[in-house]
Image (spheres, rainbow, N blue to C red):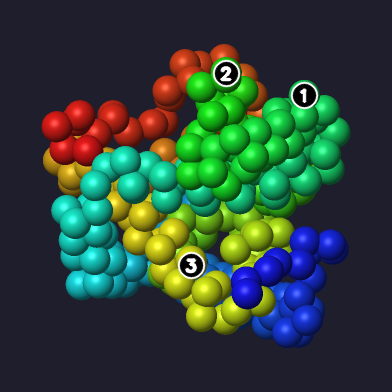
Amino acid sequence: MMTWKTAGFARHDGAPRFARAGLRWCSLVLGAALLSGCTSGPGAHPDDPLEPYNRSMARFNDGVDEAVLKPVATAYKDAVPSPVRTGVNNFFGNLGDVWSFVNNVLQLRPEEALSSLVRFNVNTVFGLGGVLDIASEMGVERNRQDFGLTLGRWGVPTGPYLVLPLLGPSTVRDTLAMPVDRQGNLVGQFDSVSARNSLYALRLVDTRAGLLGAGAVLESAALDKYSFTRDVFLQLRAQSAERPGARDGDGGDDNDGMLPPEPEADR
């Protein structure tokens, strides 16, 4: 029977070893990025001094996406009815509310922490384990947070923009926070290795399927896909770190930096 160990977000299969491996992996990625990005010229984007490395990694990720992820996500979207896909998305979002609650507490955001806790309890009990998003229907907003944003709350700078192998857009700060976020991910707390891997794969495919329409918009609207993706990512992270407003604190529209919604007919 599948169970998870939530106390301390630790498992009996050597979780600290995974954390150390994650830190080593992050160090290797950062080292490679710094070595390959040190040739950036004076005209480089101020948040993207590693642009040469990032562009090459983005091309690699795009190749993997075109060959594997996009076809699988397209087949998933064509084969699975929309209500089922919505339920899958709600389920993973509900698990994420637990880690958001922890990070909202660490950031001393009591209202957001309470919202995350209420969302998880309501959706788990009354929403069939999170498949139904009852809390949103009640007007309880989701406040997504992670450890990278928690570090930012306490003054740790984002560092340069960084494109990770297979994982895509990130920053140096968010990359260093990834081992902690991994330990806080309830999907990783299932004892069964096969169950964990299946859930990871399902979440990846479901996430990619949700971006199919946005990808089509991006391909048609952006003159430089890399720059557009970078700017959108940094804008959204800035909005998540310090609401309301973006990085420059101009109190912009909540939709600033976001792709247009996917047409209803394509959902």
- Badge 3 element: helix
Label 2: how many Cα within 10 Å (few below 14, some 14–19, many 20+): few
Q: Picture coordinates of residue 94 (x, y %)? A: 58, 44
Which mark's residue is nearer the viewer, 2 or 1?
Answer: 2
Q: Picture coordinates of residue 19 (x, y %)? A: 73, 75
> Which of the 4 image quarters holds residue 69?
bottom left
Asked if disc 2 and disc 1 are in contact, CB closer than 8 Å, the reply is no
| 241 versus 233 height, above or below | above
Q: Is residue 114 left or right of residue 89?
A: right
Residue 68 visible, this orientation: yes
- Badge 1 element: helix
Query: What's the residue type where badge 3 is placed?
Result: Tyr
Q: 104 or 49, which lies in front?
A: 104
Q: 76 or 176, which lies in front?
A: 76
Q: 267 or 29, which lies in front?
A: 267
| 138 versus 142 height, above or below | above
> Which of the 4 image quarters holds residue 59?
bottom left
Choose the circle earlier in sequence order: 3 or 1: 1
Choose the circle earlier in sequence order: 2 or 1: 1
Q: Is residue 16 left or right of residue 203?
A: right
* Residue picked out by circle 2: 139
Measured Cα–Cα span from mark 2 to mark 3: 29 Å
Residue pictured at 50% horizontal, 16% vertical: 252
- Badge 2 element: loop
* Residue picked out by circle 1: 111
Residue pictured at 57% horizontal, 19% vertical: 138
